[in-house]
Image (tube, rainbow, N blue to C red):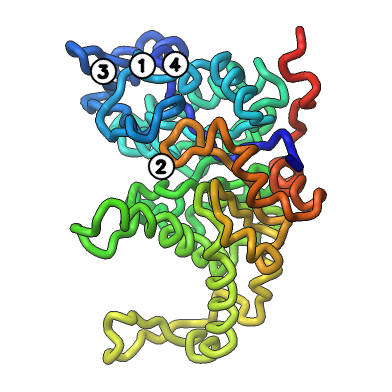
Amino acid sequence: MSFDWFISVDDHLIEPARLWQERLPERCRGTGPRIVRDGDSEFWVYEDRQIVTTGLNAVAGKRREEFSPEPITYDEMRAGCYDPAARVADMDQGHVLSSMLFPSFPRYCGQVFHEARDRELGLLCVRAWNDFILEEFADAYPGRFIPMMIIPLWDPAAAAAEIERTAARGAKSIAFSENPTKLGLPSIHTDHWDPMLRACDETGMVVSMHVGSSSNLIRTSEDMPTLAFMAYSAAANQAGTLMDWLFSGKFTRFQNLRIALSEGSIGWMPYFLERAEQVIDKQRFWASRFDISMNAAHERGEEKGAASFDLDTDIRRLFRDHVFGTFIEDQAGIRLLDIIGEDNVMLECDYPHSDSTWPDTIEMANKWLGHLPEDVQHKITVGNACRVYDFTPAAPATIGAPS
């Protein structure tokens, strides 16, 4: 094998039942997130909502024939799904040098707290999740976790404050929505998010957007078969996210800003970069003056003011400097690495979800990457993550050594 360890920039935490009950003020624990058992079933209760943990989110250690979307209890999960020490042991087993964790109960970017009525409680819940990651993962196991935070989506100023608070404690990234309009929030084409983006620009926090973080996965129809939908939706969602950001003008305003398209794969990227260049070349003159809906092609487009996007923008440079793709298995993307860029892709294993390659990631990834020069392999498996997230991982030689 060409490499023995890797950094996974997209894994997931099933929050332990104790998290908010230990960390919220006592006055909030009766309405804050808590686990309730009802016979053989188990679910989260938050305000007046009941939220289950789907079995597909906690398949680590199970055979594929055992995968199921049916709700699961903690007794049915591998301890590494929710327990920090057990997670580190599973990382050792799967040769995961360091890991970045997305939330589960709050959903990928904290949507559950955004949807709640009590904003004060929601902010306390956000801070409790962040403090848990910082203290019980990043601080407790130095070099093993890249601390990613959630933010109060409903208040960009409060989000900026939380970014600054947690960055001072070593946080490296925030979870954000791939398309906030699907959450009833303004798009990134407005100035609504500028306080948050400015804070990320100034602190170096990477904006990580997991596929599905819009609470909306694209379907061609309501009866699109499940397997077809799963094969289609990730790239379809994230391609829209990539185009939004490249044409938003945000990378010009915030020149240190970086985004990661988490679990979006990479093989589709060359086509969309090429297509973006084509439309700028061929369509930029009329498109700088008109907005049109392609669903109303025979109607006159609405004339607009001066273009908000620099029509001479170098799309490839914007992508190279600001955008990073992550993948679990993507042999097509590796074949197109010369177009995407070896500095713009990172490996993940998606523990403990049903797409995960754990604990066999090293063996599998060596088959896809083994033909590449060693320095390129190192970039994809470790180096790019260290650079993008400004993170120093644990030394492999220290893993499993007596403390």
**From the viewer's perspective, is residue 251 above or below residue 117?**
below
Q: Position of residue 197 (x, y in %)?
A: 59, 50
Amino acid carrying label 2: it is Trp
Mark 4 or mark 3: which is in front? 3
Give the residue drawn at x 33%, y 80%: 293
Q: Are marks 3 and 1 in contact (CB under 8 Å)?
A: yes
Label disc, if present, on residue 230 of the rendered structure: none
Name the residue at 61% across, 81% down.
311
Q: Which residue is mark 4?
A: 19
Label 3 residue SS? strand
Please say if 296 is above or below 140. below
Q: Is residue 380 visible in this depiction of the protein?
A: yes
Amino acid type indicated by mark 3: Glu
Q: Amino acid at mark 1?
A: Tyr
- Residue on which the image places disc 2: 154
* Label 1 residue SS: helix
Q: Secondary structure at mark 2?
A: loop
How far is the residue under mark 1 from the one under mark 4? Answer: 14 Å
Residue identified by numbered label 3:
42
Tags 2 and 3 touching, CB below 8 Å:
no
Of discs 1 and 4, which sits in the foreground?
A: 1
